[in-house]
Image (cartoon, rainbow, N blue to C red):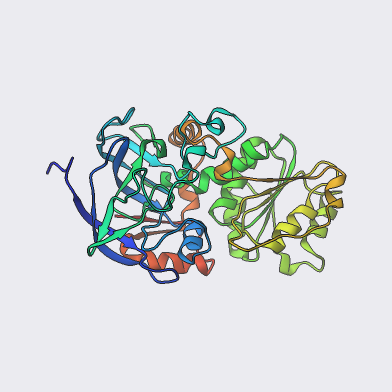
């Protein structure tokens, strides 16, 4: 049935209030307006950032809302003025869009589009939403809202991928994999023969390991309190694994001693203030680089002696791997299609959308690497 220009009814996971379970609802998705695209989502991943949004631990989240930002799908229809997209295109929504016009998009050093800043939370450019349910307006999230069978995004927040791409685990390139892999190869710029340490072995941490291995690191130390994750970490490239609770010294001291002065590159993929501090102290005192990737949430602060930076340490942060989304994402998809890395190894669970609450429980309990959902 032809759906272009018509309202589509479909299922979505709606969050009516903060700290409440997801509710599977039938929603109405309006046609795309100017420069917008309606996308049929095929698979979507569960990310810790969605949990932060669910618990009102992120700014710019307005309830009721449809969360989700790590997805892959097919263009259903396009609005007036849309360029480079047509119905049937395989696409990945981008929570970090790219307009190619603002100062940051034009500068190779940054990846936060200025045009996104200052826009009303959860609304499209015209100040309205494209979602309704039970007569109520439902807000968008991260410009993507992938926990819906159909979503509407601005053309700045979408990228076309190769037609032959299998639409399954590739959804992880929409957040998890790009965030971790890019943090290693773009933000940290890991050098061949270097030493790396990765705190947190969820999907992002494992993606960091793949990035470090790709960059030629000679030693990759994986750190997590859950030792059942070590086998997977070694399978994808970690050279050794450490459980902090098994050490008789602080983990930072252990890493410094084992590397003869500190690790070249340390990645914190948890968002925990204590592990962030440990990561800094574990880095080489003269030239170590620490990259913060995990989101700590609102009202969290980190305290350390600034003298530890005086000798040469560097602290960086990385959102979406520090990469330009519209250039980097298609290249990663092409590399995935060429079997340069295996995203399936990062997926521990596959569930239908109806079991989304189960998927979040698995993440909270630390029992999943990455869960992807299908419609």
Q: Quadrant of the C terminus?
A: bottom left
Question: Residue at point 18% right, 49% down?
Answer: 7
- Where is residue 79? Give x, y as percent: 26, 36
Question: Residue at point 33% right, 61% down?
Answer: 13
Locate residue 140 relative to residue 273 in the image: left or right: left
Residue 226: image quadrant is: bottom right
Q: Is residue 183 above or below residue 61?
A: above
Locate residue 226 relative to residue 254 in the image: left or right: left
- Where is residue 355? Give x, y as percent: 35, 66
> Could you tell me how many numbered marks the image carries?
0
Question: Residue at point 80% right, 64% down?
Answer: 250
| Residue 327 seen in the current view | yes
Who is closer to the viewer here, 147 or 345? 147
Q: Is residue 166 above or below residue 257?
A: above
Residue 91: image quadrant is: top left
Who is closer to the viewer here, 335 or 11? 11
Question: Residue at point 59% right, 35% down?
Answer: 110
- Where is residue 175? Give x, y as percent: 49, 47
Residue 32: image quadrant is: top left
Residue ranking furthest to the bottom: 20
Q: Is residue 37 above or below residue 57?
A: above
Locate residue 202 relative to residue 44 in the image: left or right: right
- Where is residue 36? Give x, y as percent: 31, 38
| Residue 242 seen in the current view | no
Q: Quadrant of the N terminus?
A: top left
Residue ranking furthest to the left: 1
């Amino acid at each position: 049935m032809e759906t272009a220009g018509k309202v589509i009814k479909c299922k979505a996971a709606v969050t009516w209030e903060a700290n409440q379970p997801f509710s599977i609802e039938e929603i109405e998705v309006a046609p795309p307006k100017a420069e917008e695209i309606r996308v049929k989502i095929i698979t979507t991943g569960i990310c810790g950032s969605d949990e932060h949004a669910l618990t009102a631990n992120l700014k710019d989240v307005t309830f009721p809302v449809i969360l989700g930002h790590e997805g892959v799908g097919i263009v259903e229809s396009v609005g007036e003025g849309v360029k480079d997209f047509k119905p049937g295109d395989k696409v990945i929504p981008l929570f970090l869009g790219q307009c190619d016009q603002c100062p940051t998009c034009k500068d190779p050093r940054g990846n936060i589009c200025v045009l996104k800043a200052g826009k009303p939370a959860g609304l499209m450019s015209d100040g309205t939403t494209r979602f309704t349910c039970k007569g109520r307006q439902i807000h968008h999230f991260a410009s993507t809202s992938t926990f819906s069978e159909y979503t509407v995004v601005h053309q700045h927040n979408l990228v076309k991928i190769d037609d032959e791409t299998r639409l399954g685990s590739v959804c992880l390139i929409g957040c998890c994999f790009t965030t971790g892999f890019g943090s290693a190869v773009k933000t940290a710029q890991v050098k061949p023969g270097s030493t790396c340490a990765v705190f947190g072995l969820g999907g992002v941490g494992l993606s960091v390991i793949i990035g470090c291995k790709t960059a030629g690191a000679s030693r990759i130390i994986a750190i997590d309190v859950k030792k059942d994750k070590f086998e997977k970490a070694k399978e994808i490239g970690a050279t050794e694994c450490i459980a902090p609770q098994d050490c008789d010294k602080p983990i930072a001291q252990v890493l410094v001693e084992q590397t003869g002065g500190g690790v070249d590159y340390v990645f914190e993929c948890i968002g925990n203030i204590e592990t962030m501090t440990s990561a800094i102290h574990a880095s080489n005192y003269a030239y170590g680089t620490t990259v913060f990737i995990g989101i700590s949430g609102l009202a969290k602060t980190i305290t350390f002696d600034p003298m530890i930076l005086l000798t040469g340490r560097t602290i960086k942060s990385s959102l979406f791997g520090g990469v330009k989304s519209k250039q980097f994402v298609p290249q990663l998809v092409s590399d995935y299609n060429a079997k340069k890395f295996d995203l399936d190894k990062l997926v521990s669970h596959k569930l239908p959308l109806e079991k989304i609450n189960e998927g979040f429980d698995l993440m909270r309990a630390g029992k999943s690497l990455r869960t992807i959902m299908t419609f």
